[in-house]
Image (cartoon, rainbow, N blue to C red):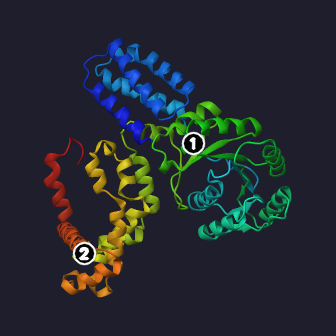
Amino acid sequence: MFESLSERLGRTVKQLRGQGRLSEDNIKDTMREVRMALLEADVALPVVKTFIDNVREKALGQEVIGSLSPGQALIKVVNDELVALMGENTASLNLATQPPAVVLIAGLQGAGKTTTVGKLARWLKEREKKKVMVVSCDVYRPAAIKQLETLAESVDVLFHPSTAVDTVNGIAKGALDAAKRQMVDVLLVDTAGRLAIDEEMMAEIKSLHQVVNPIETLFVVDSMTGQDAANTAKAFGDALPLTGVVLTKTDGDARGGAALSVRMVTGKPIKFIGSGEKTDALEAFHPDRVASRILGMGDVVSLVEEVTAKVDHSKAEKLAKKIKRGKNFDLEDMRDQLEQMANMGGMSALLDKLPGGADLPEAVKQKANDKEFVRMIALINSMTPQERKHPAIIKGSRRKRIAAGSGCQVQDVNKLLKQHLQMSKMMKKMKGGGMAKMMRGMKGRMPPGMM
């Protein structure tokens, strides 16, 4: 998300950084570039106008013109206004009520409501340690109930059964009673969507809202619809007391206009963003971190959180002890590392969160191709346990067999073994205090205070 906006703003920011002083003329030119970047990102026109006016007003003030590094000061103003635009603070779910806390999920058909219910159930279970139940009140879409049941099984949460012949309100009442009996902390209610906003749909969801009396009513919207996302969210907000928005399919949206428009148009905070089909592809929305990503400054905090949540610490500890004892780094260890990297969204997701990652040349980004991870894992899986433990035995005929078994070429096997050898050599340097020696050797080349 935000690739095109980030690239355009990045160029503008670079031109400013070296400026000794800023005048009204070059601020005017910069604002024109920023305006074009926002419009191309499909940000709603009233939002663009307000944003530009606010930045211009602050940029022409003493805090920028009188600054020792006015270019940096203007970048800070743009960053602060982006944060203000998307909501000053991170809006978390409010679950402070007598259990079960009911969360109602609303939205148009195809926005990804049912998938979001599955993701949110997993997020609540793993991050918030809640006992979760899900129920589908979508009696119109074929297999909607079955889809949610499958998702509930995959994330290991309770599922309240329903059928297409039941009434929507009847299903909701039954789920609420079951949640109370089973001492559930959070009940997630999936609702039916329509291809467009209509009176019948709004009347049904209003009635359902009265029955379950949710503490949170989240509107799920497809970010790829751009300005329409903000407009449909506003229409739902006029009919229902929405408490927040969930943006889905952000991985397919290079522009990011919806994320910048929704907050101002609806007055409701974005609480989560979904970025893929997998049930772990949901993250809390942090305006300050997103603004930092847009301006190419990375998002190290989110990266650290992701590593803490998704890395298998027992495997990491086991590998560290193995290296310390001087044992060889074999291909099974390499596969574990590749799988952990893939769990965090792959190399492209990590680059996106690293400062300066967006400024890397396109050729470098292409090399950090996540398909390469999949190929390498397939090659290692195609080996026997003995070959994984002792890569030196993999000669000509074995290489052909491994390539054929994984659907790859012999040169792919050669490349993998070469990469493994390089990693193995690096790991050997780290044993017996080697890491400390390496760090001491680098000390003179690092910025003051880094060590």
Residue drawn at 82 percent across, 57 percent down: 168
Whether residue 88 is visible: no
Tag 2: amino acid? Val
Residue 345 place in picture, x, y as percent? 42, 58
Residue drawn at 68 percent across, 47 percent down: 107
**What's the distance in space between the residues labelled 1 and 2, CA to CA?**
43 Å
Give 381 or 242, whichever is nearer the viewer.
381
Q: Is residue 442 above or below residue 310?
A: above
Residue drawn at 81 percent across, 52 percent down: 212
**Number of marks in picture:** 2
Q: Residues within 10 Å of mark 2 (few under 14, many from 20)?
A: many
Q: In the figure, residue 77 lies in which quadrant? A: top left
Task: State the SS at label 1.
Answer: helix
The reply to whether dot 1 and dot 2 touch (C-beta < 8 Å) is: no
Task: Report which residue position mark 2 lands on.
Answer: 413
Tag 1: amino acid? Thr
Whether residue 375 is visible: yes
Residue 7 place in picture, x, y as percent? 36, 37
Instruction: Give the mark toward the camera: 1 or 2.
Output: 1
Residue drawn at 37 percent across, 32 percent down: 9
Label 1 vs 2, first from the N-terminus: 1
Task: State the SS at label 2.
Answer: helix
Which numbered dot is residue 225?
A: 1
Which numbered dot is residue 343?
A: none
